[in-house]
Each structure stands twice: as C-alpha cells, then as structure tokens.
Image (cartoon, rainbow, N blue to C red):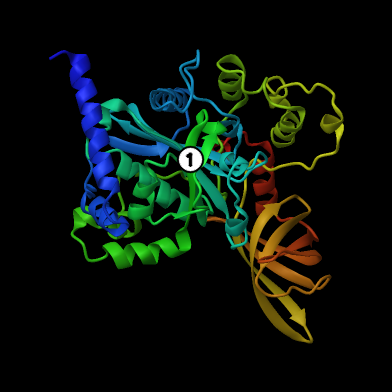
Amino acid sequence: MSGIKQASLRKRFRHMLRHVFSCLPRQTRFSIYRAMIECDQDPDPRLELKVAESQEEIEDCFKILHDAYVASGFMKPAESGMRVTMYHALPTTTTLCAKYDGRVVGTMSMIREGVFGFPLQSVFDLSDVRAKEGQIAEISALAVHPDFRKTGGAILFPLMKFMYEYCTEFFDTRHLVIAVNPERIELYESLLFFERLQERVVENYDFANGAPAVGASLDLSRARGIFRQVYGRRRLSKNLYKYFVTLRLPNIKLPKRRYFTTNDPVLTPDTLDYFFNRRSDVFAKLDDRRKALLWSIYDQPEYRRVLPMLSGSPVAVHPMRRHQRFSLRCPAELRLTVNDGERTLMLTVIEISLSGFQATSKLAVPLHADGVALIELGAEERSVLNVAAVRHHRTDTVDFYGFKLVEPDAAWRRCVSALETGHTAGDL
C-alpha cells in the first residue's frame, strides 16, 4: 500500500475515533484525559527549561512556532521561516524555551497586559476576568518540535510546569487566558480546569489565520486547591498537584533577579532590529499609535535607530505617558505617627522614580501625613525613606497611592538608575 493511502487511512481512522470519543458524556471524556496523564517526576538531565534570552534561542523558538502554525493552518508560510508578532516586541512578553542537549525543542510565550493589550481581546470579552483582582497573562505561541511530539508529554508537561511556576512566583500573574482551537479546548478544561470565556466558538480568529477559536481563563489563586482536590491522592506520574505545586525540577532555570522586578525583558536594540525590521516587517506594519507606544517604552537613545518612524498623523504627536520596561512588586512597610501614636500599614510598591513611587494598600493611607517607608527592593536591597502620600486613586478592587520622597537614599538611587538605564533584565 502506498504511503499516501496509508496516511489517508490513518487520518480517517483518527477522525472516526474523535467522533466516537466526542459522543461520550463530558465527564467521561474528562476522566479519560486525566487517566492518560504521564508526568515524569525526574526528567532527563539533558532537558533544560529557561527564558529564551539569546538571539539564537529566540530565533529557534520562532522557527518551531512557525512550522507548527503553518502545519496546523494557523498562519501562512513566512519568508523568514519564523512566526514573529508585535507582542513579542514588548518587554511584558516572556518567551520560554525547552532545550534538549542544547537544542531548542519547545516554546511558549506569556503575554502580560502591555501597551498593545492581548491578542485574544480582539474577539473575546475579558471584562469578567478584569473585574477580579490580579494581573492577567495570555498563554500563547505554544509549540513542540515534531521529533518530540510523541514522547508522552516529556517536553509539554515540563514546559507547562515551568509556565505555572514562573507565573505564580516571578511574573506577578493571577489569571491566565488562552485562545485555542475547539478540538483542543477540552484538554485545558479537563487537565488544568480552564473555564470558557463564552460558550460560543469564534469561527474566524484573525490572530490564527481565520481558524476557529475558543477562549478560556484560569484563576491561579484557585487552581492550587482544585489541583489538590482532584489529583492530590493519585500516584506520582498522574498527580498534577504535586507536579505543578510542590515538585522542584532542577531542569528549570528560573531567572536570577537583583530587584523584585516581575518581568524579564531580553531585547537589545540589535535584537529588536534583527527580528522586527530585518527578518520581518512587523514594525513597518504598525499604525502610528502603536509606533508611538513603542517609542514610549524604548525611550533610550540606543533604541532610536531601530524603532519605526511615525508618519506624522495627529495620533503620533498626541502626548503619551512614558511606559516602563520593567515592572516591580516590592513589599513595603509604612510607619506613620498619628495622634501621638505609631500606625503601621503594609504596601506593595509597583512603580518608582527618583522622587517618588506608586503603591497599593488594602487599608486607607492618610494623605500628606509624614511617615517612614521601609521598602524591600530586592532580596539584598532595602531602602528606608521619609515619605508622604500625596495622591489617591481607587478602582473597583484596589486603592493606589502616590508617594513623594523627602530624599532618596543610596539604595533607592541605585535601583532607579538600574531600571532607567538597563536594556535587559541582565543589566540590573
């Protein structure tokens, strides 16, 4: 029998199996998915999971993603052989890679909300997710090299664990959102307990070349308890609670940070130029507003030569706020003297400058009252500052306060300087 006929028969057989499987009750299907779990608690030491940092690692990730998307019909072949999107140009996007024997074999991108929003928000309503407290990240650009797709999750599960660990411990993320093909949504629902954003399938999702898509979200603050309830008593190879929550894999190389930053930008002026000007036309296709937003992020002189020029439309010259390349989440203690007594409040510092900072507080902070702030800038970096709250802004879930410093100390000056002059996370 010819290879073509064999392939056709296999395709028809798989289609028939999918049809039979889809006729089973939903909970039966979910139980079967969970019974098929095989997660290796001791992966091959040749497997390494890390943030893609070098130009070579990023390019290999984009190539694997391109080939997977083309094969699935989610994009047309690109001349570069890479899938490069405008979201990959943002410092709020982190690309993870799985390497086996030094070769990139899997990738996944995590897009935290930045100046361009999320890819899926063009077709899915995120208002219910936004109404809850916590940062959101879209999980996107997941691909495994064809040589490793039939290894029983030997690459996929470690990559998913790395994503879970990174989001919960390093990326300041509470909610994950995804847009996936309808044929794959039940894997996310049954194994990871994602919940659909809407019942209706989007029939034409532009970000995936017009393929149908289903949107879903996962609240990581609740996921831990659900994983424990469903998987907690299962044997190790099928226990996703222990795998995701308690197991520490030496294969995972989490980034080392001097300060309590929550993202790990890796793009230098040269790598931005390489991927978004020379190897693709991503920058050239941006409208003037998005170009201006890039200028507000990459505002250092070194980046000017690689950023796309504006056409001069009214949007381009409209004043725009400066956007940070590095986001922060620093625990802090505010001591105030009120009515001849001392009152202590806990803060979370989220943005800093040489003369002040912005923080959130669960308790009301009196404006213009003098106090002392003890701020943990990093594991070994601490500032003690005389401050006063001068602004207050309240949302549905959080109170934001703006603080003015009397005088920055040496640790504060070092941190602000590093954040303002550093190109990548490695510069800090």
**Residue 29, how many percent across, how many down?**
27, 53
| Residue under the image location 37 percent in, 45 percent down | 160
| Residue under the image location 70 percent in, 36 percent down | 297
**Residue 131 can be seen in this image:** yes
**Quadrant hosting residue 362:** bottom right
The quarter of the rendered structure image containing the N terminus is top left
Left or right: 401 in relation to 415: right
| 140 in relation to 359, above or below | above
Left or right: 310 in relation to 159: right
Query: Pointer 1: what residue?
Result: 213
**Quadrant hosting residue 298:** top right
Crowding near pointer 1: few (<14 within 10 Å), some, many (20+)? Answer: many
Label 1: which secondary element: strand
**Residue 408, how many percent across, how many down?**
74, 55
* Residue sitting at the far bottom: 340
| Residue under the image location 43 percent in, 39 percent down | 181
Left or right: 45 in relation to 67: left
- The residue type indicated by label 1 comes to Ala
